[in-house]
Amino acid sequence: MFVSRLAVQLRTRSSHLWIKYCTAAVAQHVSPDINQAQWTPSSRRVGVIALKLGMSHLWLKDGGRVSVTLLQIVDNQIVSIKEGDKEGLFNVEVGCVNHDKPHRLSESQLEYFQSAGIPPKRKLMEFPVTEDALLPIGTPLIAAHFLVGQYVDVRAITIGKGFQGVMKRHGMKGQPASHGQTKTHRKMGATGGGGDLGRIFKGKRMPGRMGCKNATNFSVKVYRINYIFNVLYVKGQVPGHDNQYVKLRDGLWKPHSPEQPPPFPTYIRPGGHELPEEEFSDDVQLPHEPVLQFEGTPMVKRPQRKR
């Protein structure tokens, strides 16, 4: 049931052709200097924009079950490169999801994408990138930009809950349910503004609008990558609703190790090399692997005694 539902949600529009176009476009745009670039611990690569598809789960080899969120990378390309606010960093603009109704865009927007030589995009985001990890304009980004088992930072807008009280918004206890309380069961109580103070401190937790803010999940592990549909399976929940745009980048708190560097500055397919259908982390229990393994001599059934 989940596979059929996933097939409906995934944008299956000629995914094989899109991957072939991406690798061919990378080969056209990449210069010899980029092929010789080497990753260093101080390098910061560009991120991608993904679509949140929903949640599922995977089984681990130790018997545990982990919840995962499916993130699909759709039509990601480099749009522009700007100078950053900090020294040594550049703001690389990435666009995703080709616009199916470009006639609704303004003339200035169409000229902006036309100057970059790419189709109009629905969503644009910027990423801080070091100079050694810059990519030419128009370079596609696919799921092979990341590695299985690495940690990523996921940033998105949380689901808006509207105006909520302190019990739902901040998890406060509220007032007693009896003992003389009248219509104040879910109130916050005193705010502490009386006496000499005569005011309320800034940042006091009170009722207000809940959600609809940027939230970041740091150091989220990638358990599985599907290279056909460009889908990443990341651990846990991701902020936002389904079909929401998610900002994905390399983890800052848990970066890559020098023993296993990432594709730098992005994945460039070598000649004659084909990507597998999907790839799993080492601690994930694969469906075709045996669940239990017995070592030594097999158990012999004892004969039953006659009664």
Image (cartoon, grey):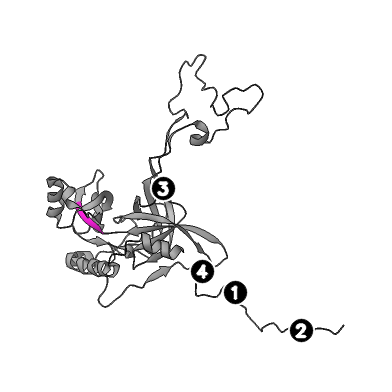
Quadrant that contains the C terminus: bottom right
Secondary structure mostly taken by the magenta-highlighted segment of the chain: strand
Mark count: 4
Q: CA distance from mark 4 to mark 3?
A: 27 Å
Q: x%, y% of residue 190?
A: 54, 22
Q: Which residues are magenta?
A: 75-80
Q: Are the residues flagged by discs 4 and 2 in contact, CB closer than 8 Å?
A: no
Q: Residues within 10 Å of mark 2 (few under 14, many from 20)?
A: few
Does 185 sit above or below residue 227?
Answer: above
Residue at figure coordinates x 47%, y 68% from the top left? 282
Q: Residues within 10 Å of mark 4 (few under 14, many from 20)?
A: some
Between residue 123 and residue 86, name the one nearer to us: 123
Query: Which secondary structure lies at badge 4?
Result: loop
Query: Which secondary structure lies at badge 3?
Result: loop
Q: x%, y% of residue 44?
A: 31, 55
**Which amino acid type is marked by label 2?**
Arg
**In this figure, which residue is indicated by the disc labeled 1?**
292
**In this figure, which residue is indicated by the disc labeled 2?**
302
Image depth: mark 4 or mark 2 in front: 2
**In this figure, which residue is indicated by the disc labeled 4?**
285
Residue 239, disc: 3
Between residue 31 and residue 140, name the one nearer to us: 140
**Which amino acid type is marked by label 3?**
Pro
Q: CA distance from mark 3 to mark 2?
A: 57 Å
Question: Which of disc 2 and disc 1 is earlier in sequence?
Answer: 1
Between residue 68 and residue 136, name the one nearer to us: 68
Q: Are the residues flagged by discs 1 and 2 in contact, CB closer than 8 Å?
A: no
Residue at figure coordinates x 45%, y 63% from the top left? 2
Question: Which of disc 2 and disc 3 is earlier in sequence?
Answer: 3
Q: Residues within 10 Å of mark 3 (few under 14, many from 20)?
A: many
Q: Is residue 26 magenta?
A: no
* Left or right of 105 in this view: 246: right
